Amino acid sequence: MVLDNKLGLTSSADLAREEERLTKSRAKELIETGQLFRFEVGTFKGLADIHRALFADIYDFAGKLRDVNIAKDNFQFAPRMFLASSLDYLDKLPHTTFDEIVDKYAEMNVAHPFREGNGRAMRIWLDCMLRIQLGHVVDWNSVDKEAYLMAMKRSPIATGELKYLLLNHLTDDLSQATFFKGVDASYYYEGYQLYKTEEL
């Protein structure tokens, strides 16, 4: 199934390619202009602003709560009827320490508030929290993608594996190149068949 898109693309491969190109371009613009650092940090509003900025050229639903139930690899994300209340709860969670930030990130992944593009928007959202609170971001270039996907898959049960992985790949290099890598779509598309998000 290919999502309805503003580009009129009907091939999933073509859409994936254009998504990556356009979202990287938008992420670069957000960072270069400093607009990213004016968004709220650690709230759903901030995440929605990031998502809207990344995907507005591609989807009408950019920055908007999904209106369908979705699942990935037999795991159902937060039911849409409880999504708004889940996000209200998440907004109240603290995000001042490394553990709190990663726990909040994992909880937001369970919510999976958007129809598509959650991972890319959330990795930037995570780095914004880490940057403000700890003066570090994740060096995504050095994170093993398969290990990351497995840790994310298991994070609804326990976040220890994810915390260990991310803690060992923090950097105080806050340059654009390091910060920008989090939008790399290959963290999502690698192993696409296994991790494909499906509408229920």
Image (cartoon, helix red, strand yellow):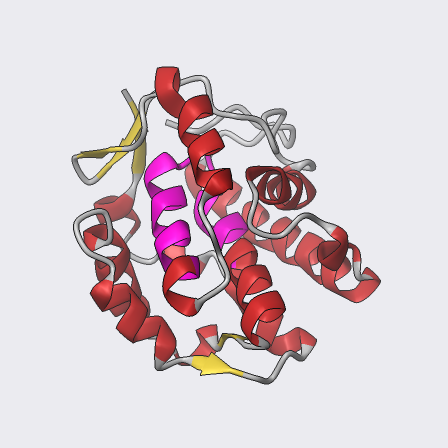
Q: Residue at x 63, y 58 (%)?
A: 24
Q: Residue at x 62, y 37 (%)?
A: 45
Q: Is residue 194 magenta?
A: no
Q: Is residue 108 magenta?
A: yes
Nearer to the camera, 79 or 22: 79
Horizontal and vertical percent position of residue 13? 44, 44
**Is residue 114 at least partly visible in the picture?**
no
**Is residue 187 at least partly visible in the picture?**
yes
Nearer to the camera, 24 or 165: 165
Q: Main secondary structure of the magenta part?
A: helix
Q: Is residue 110 left or right of residue 182?
A: left
Q: How many marks?
A: 0
Nearer to the camera, 140 or 23: 140
Q: Residue at x 71, y 62 (%)?
A: 28
Q: Residue at x 55, y 32 (%)?
A: 9
Quarter placement of the C terminus = top left
Q: Which residues are magenta?
A: 101-123
Residue 78, located in which quarter of the rendered image? top left
Q: Is residue 32 left or right of residue 109?
A: right
Vertical placement of residue 190 versus 6, above or below? below
Quarter placement of the N terminus = top left
Residue 147, located in which quarter of the rendered image? bottom left
Horizontal and vertical percent position of residue 105? 41, 52
Vertical placement of residue 104 versus 101, above or below? above
Vertical placement of residue 137 versus 73, above or below? below
Horizontal and vertical percent position of residue 8? 61, 27
Q: Is residue 81 left or right of residue 121?
A: left
